[in-house]
Amino acid sequence: MAISFDEVQHVARLARLELSNSELLIFQSELNALLGHFSDLNEIDVTGILPKPHAVSMHNVWADDIAEVGLTREYALRNAPRSRAGLFVVPTIIEE
């Protein structure tokens, strides 16, 4: 199935593209080449090949859910620009 010049012109008009006739001819040939590639793909025998949900094989990596000791409050606040009463002090972003 080939795309006609009128179809390319119609699509360009729908997309509000101002193209010259030579540009429309270039797009027509490129679209027809693309359709040729799709027809080549349709000719491939895929019987017996199961469809895949992803292009690459995927598997989950599960880590053991083990509780570990985290940062101490003093260590977490060590590099904070400002802290008070063991908490981070941040600039106010909501004004009343």
Image (spheres, rainbow, N blue to C red):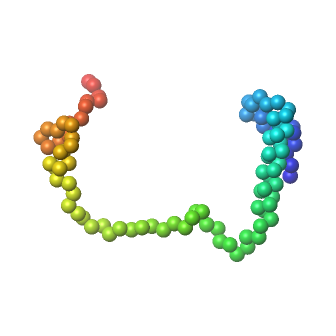
Query: Outermost residue, left direction?
Result: 85
- Furthest-front residue in this view: 79
Residue found farthest to the bottom: 48
Vertical placement of residue 76 versus 65, above or below:
above
Q: Tell me if residue 16 comes above or below residue 53 in the rendering.
A: above
Residue 89, given in percent of the width and then of the height, sits at 20, 36
Tell me: residue 1, above or below residue 90: below
Q: Position of residue 17 (x, y in %)?
A: 75, 31
Q: Nearer the viewer, residue 15 or 68?
A: 68
Which residue is pictured at 83% across the width and 42% down the height? Answer: 28
Using residue 47 as the reference point, say whether residue 80 is left or right of it.
left
Q: Quadrant of residue 27?
A: top right
* Residue at 17% in and 53% down: 72
Q: Is residue 10 visible?
A: no
* Residue at (23, 63) in percent of width and height: 68
The image quarter containing residue 95 is top left
Quadrant of image for the C terminus: top left
